[in-house]
Amino acid sequence: MAAAPAEDISEFVIPSGDAAGAAAAAPASKSAGNTGALVTAVLIFLVVVVIVYLMAAPQTLSAKLARQGWVLYVMPGCGYCKKQQRLLGTTRYPKKVVCVKRSPSGQAAIALEPSTLAETNAPLLCSRVQAYPFWINQRTGEVRKGLQGPRALQSMLA
């Protein structure tokens, strides 16, 4: 009688001792590595989505007016100035000049918001402002006196 071929039983051998713990831990660490890669991929995807959303977000009316060169002159305590800023949706208009009361020498003082000091380059002294709120376009020289409603603000973009 011929001897039966010996079967390879190495697949069925269960290691004992420390080798068993290492063999059982190997699949878990591989799985943890895959989970970490998946989490990283999801985070990168979310960052890209947020960046795309922010770049595609429509600009506010304030940003559009400032980009076209409009400078807003306001005075503390002026009710119409507060209404104008509410219509813009912000009290931090990018190109705003805050005119304060006249000094004892008769000169009107100018107080710019710190964040806008460098970018405003106020085209007009407060002493020459005729009504508040007061708008002047740095590019065209166009002037708007008093409170500008939503339609007037939109027309300033044309």
Image (cartoon, rainbow, N blue to C red):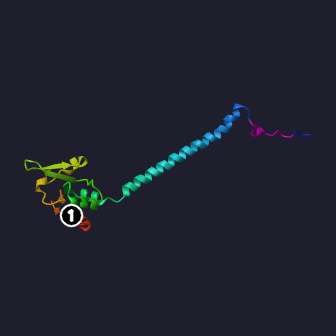
Q: Position of residue 108 (x, y in %)?
A: 12, 51
Q: Quadrant of residue 31?
A: top right
Q: Quadrant of residue 9?
A: top right
Q: Quadrant of the C terminus?
A: bottom left
Left or right, 93 with reference to 16: left
Disc 1: CA contacts within 10 A as few (<14), some (14-19) or many (>=20): many
Q: Can residue 158 be seen?
A: no
Residue plotted at (34% across, 60% down): 58
Closest to the observer: 158 or 9? 158
Name the residue: 42% across, 53% down: 50
Q: Which residue is mark 1?
A: 147
Q: Is residue 34 magenta?
A: no
User: Residue 132: image x %, image y %?
Assistant: 17, 59
- Judge whether residue 7 is colored magenta: yes
What kind of element bears circle 1?
A: loop
What type is the residue that disc 1 sits on?
Leu
Q: Give the percent coordinates (x, y) of residue 42.
A: 50, 50
